[in-house]
Image (cartoon, rainbow, N blue to C red):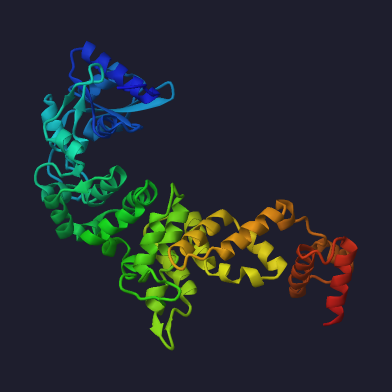
């Protein structure tokens, strides 16, 4: 099984201790799949015939993370492993979890209740032997995501499995088996019943684990995109001016950008996904195709869509900033020095740069403005982007000026002059303030 990490060593130790007490025990699930594929397995799970009370007796420091389902969490030396009693699930009523479980001693009963064949393999961590009751090895070799048993039953049990199938297909580069995909298309509306936080977390993985473009295409093909992000689905067929966007409609442009992402943060991935989300509702044809106000509309839609999916406030604001500023790069060669410096010192500016670069490469291909800003960054020491103010509000008060609305204008003008190198001392700043007040 190659070199072991801490979690794998702990899992092996747990299996050996359980077997020494006469229990059946195996590695199970995603860790087995990843080990067989030669991928790094991060989370290790053990399935066993031992009952929860026996597990707590054997591992006294363990936490009951799913007492109702017979799951305990064993921690040791900075590693953790979930250990679960073999079980059979009772009826699902809420589209998320069974009403109850029946503990079993037969591992076959445990794996046939799982979601996809490639996630239902058992492995002996001592010998490396794999036990396969559901055809998972063949599907691994064929690179197929297939629901265990009747796919409609599997998806009705837990509606989030609709998205999980896409996440696994994208992450592993696998195809979704046709019968499984047909069931996904038929049952896509069920995703509306899933808690927004669970949908959000799967979406994050689809967008950031590699293959974001394919994830969106699969979501679109089975109808999940229209259920989860109808604002993005609305991009399809929205034409763009061919002189600026020879690649095609807004949807195609966005897909090409998503394909260019490399291990993105979730804010950059969402920024790319939503940067043109304001175009469908602002599309009109005058002398040419126009999207007047699409940036402002895009910011509004971004706030609404990400709030609906329960993204944290800071993520929403960061993504909205990417949407709000993505067109400003058109003006960088003509910006005043102070305006350009303020632009370049925005929080997360490297993500603004990354989005602009992808935007250009997915359309006209002209990186002139991108290179212009890169050159400016090289020429501009970081400390000159936001230098210590030459004049503060306290300085203006000390000079005899009364606080009021004019203060902000005066201080902004002094900072502009400082950023542009027109003034370099406090005295020069106060002189500029004096001239401004004289003009009142």
Residue extending farthest to the bottom is: 287
Residue 247 falls left or right of residue 409: left
Q: Is residue 302 above or below residue 406?
A: above
**Residue at the extreme left of the image, as rendered:** 150
From this viewpoint, is residue 75 visible?
Answer: no
In terms of image quadrants, where is residue 107?
A: top left
Q: Position of residue 254 (x, y in %)?
A: 39, 63
The answer to whether 325 is drawn above or below residue 163 in the figure is: below
Residue 323 visible here: yes
Which residue lies at the image location 43% right of the left edge and 53% below the top edge? Answer: 261
Image quarter of the C terminus: bottom right
From the viewer's side, name the closer residue of 252 and 23.
252
**Nearer to me, 143 or 271:** 143
At 64% from the left edge and 69% from the top edge, which residue is drawn?
333
Viewer-side residue, 5 vs 392: 5
At 79% from the left edge and 59% from the top edge, which residue is drawn?
A: 389
In the image, residue 215 above or below residue 418: above
x and y percentages locating residue 301 in the rendered image: 42, 69
From the viewer's perspective, tell me whether residue 218 is left or right of residue 310: left
x and y, in percent, of residue 238 in the image: 34, 75
**Which image quadrant is residue 278 in?**
bottom left
Residue 228 locus on image (x, y percent): 30, 61
Quadrant of the image occupied by residue 405: bottom right
Please identify the quadrant where the N terminus is shown.
Answer: top left
| Total marks placed | 0
Going by the image, does 231 lie left or right of 47? right
């Amino acid at each position: 099984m190659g070199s072991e990490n801490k979690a794998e060593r702990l899992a092996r130790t747990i299996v050996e201790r359980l077997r020494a007490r006469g229990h059946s025990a195996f590695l199970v699930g995603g860790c087995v799949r990843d080990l067989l594929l030669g991928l790094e397995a991060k989370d290790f799970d053990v399935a066993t015939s031992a009952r929860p009370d026996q597990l707590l007796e054997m591992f006294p420091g363990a936490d009951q993370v799913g007492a109702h389902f017979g799951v305990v969490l064993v921690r040791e030396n900075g590693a953790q492993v979930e250990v679960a009693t073999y079980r059979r699930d009772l009826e699902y009523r809420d589209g998320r979890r069974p009403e109850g479980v029946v503990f079993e001693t037969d591992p076959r009963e445990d794996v046939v209740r799982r979601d996809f064949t490639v996630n239902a393999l058992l492995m002996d961590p001592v010998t490396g032997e794999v036990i396969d009751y559901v055809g998972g090895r063949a599907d691994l070799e064929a690179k197929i995501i297939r629901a265990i048993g009747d796919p409609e039953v599997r998806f009705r049990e837990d509606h989030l499995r609709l998205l999980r199938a896409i996440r696994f297909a994208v992450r592993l580069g696998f195809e979704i088996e046709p019968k499984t995909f047909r069931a996904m298309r038929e049952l896509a509306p069920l995703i509306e019943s899933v808690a927004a936080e669970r949908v959000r977390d799967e979406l994050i993985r689809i967008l950031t684990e590699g293959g974001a473009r394919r994830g969106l295409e699969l979501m679109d093909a089975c109808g999940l995109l229209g259920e989860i992000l109808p604002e993005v689905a609305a991009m399809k067929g929205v034409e763009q001016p061919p002189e600026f966007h020879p690649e095609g409609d807004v949807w195609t442009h966005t897909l090409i950008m998503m394909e260019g992402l490399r291990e993105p943060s979730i804010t950059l991935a969402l920024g790319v996904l939503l940067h043109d989300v304001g175009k469908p509702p602002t599309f009109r044809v005058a002398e040419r195709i126009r999207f007047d106000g699409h940036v402002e509309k895009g910011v509004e839609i971004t706030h609404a869509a990400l709030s609906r999916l329960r993204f944290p406030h800071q993520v929403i604001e960061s993504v909205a900033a990417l949407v709000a500023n993505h067109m400003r790069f058109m003006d960088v060669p003509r910006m005043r020095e102070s305006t350009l410096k303020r632009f370049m010192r925005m929080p997360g500016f490297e993500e603004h740069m990354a989005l602009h670069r992808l935007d250009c490469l997915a359309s006209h291909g002209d990186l002139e403005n991108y290179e212009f800003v890169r050159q400016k960054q090289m020429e501009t020491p970081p400390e000159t982007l936001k230098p210590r103010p030459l004049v503060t509000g306290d300085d203006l008060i000390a000079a005899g000026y009364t606080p009021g609305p004019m203060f902000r204008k005066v201080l902004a003008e002094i900072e502009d002059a400082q950023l542009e190198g027109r003034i370099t001392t406090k005295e020069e700043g106060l002189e500029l303030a004096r001239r401004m007040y004289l003009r009142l």
